[in-house]
Image (cartoon, rainbow, N blue to C red):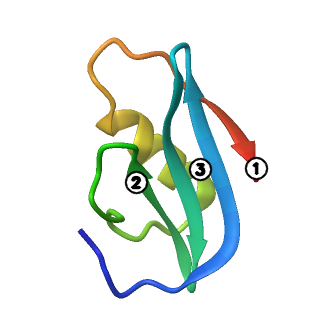
Amino acid sequence: MMSDMTLTGQTWVAFGPAGAVGSVHRIDGGYTFKLMADPGFRAAYPSLDVAKSALYAALLPGAEWPEFREH
């Protein structure tokens, strides 16, 4: 888990059928994400689409692609 990231204020919350499952955050130089149960942010990713894909890949097998809403 990464702890030395500077968030820039842009956040996209990922929603599944049962509610929020995680969030993607813009950081200096890219994007990161965390699932609701994560204690901290994960790795840095070069683009929003890559970070969304990484969040989806971290969900349980069979999970639907979440709806991402900017907040």
What crowding class fits label 1: few (fewer than 14 Cα within 10 Å), some (14-19), or many (20 or more)? Answer: few
Identify the residue position indicated by label 1 in the image: 70
Residue at x 32%, y 62% (from the top left corner):
42
Q: CA distance from mark 2 to mark 1?
A: 15 Å
Q: In the picture, residue 63 is in which quadrant?
A: top left
**The disc labelled 1 sits on which kind of residue?**
Glu
Q: Position of residue 12 (x, y in %)?
A: 66, 51
Q: Is residue 60 at all visible to an observer of this figure? A: yes
Per the rendering, the mark at residue 49 is: 3
Identify the residue position indicated by label 2 in the image: 34
**The disc labelled 2 sits on which kind of residue?**
Lys
Q: Nearer the viewer, mark 3 or mark 2?
A: 2
Q: Are marks 3 and 2 in contact (CB under 8 Å)?
A: no
N-terminal-most mark, 2 or 1: 2
Q: Position of residue 54 (x, y in %)?
A: 40, 46
Q: Position of residue 45 (x, y in %)?
A: 45, 66
**The disc labelled 3 sits on which kind of residue?**
Asp
N-terminal-most mark, 1 or 3: 3
Q: CA distance from mark 3 to mark 2?
A: 15 Å
Q: Image check: 21 left or right of 62?
A: right
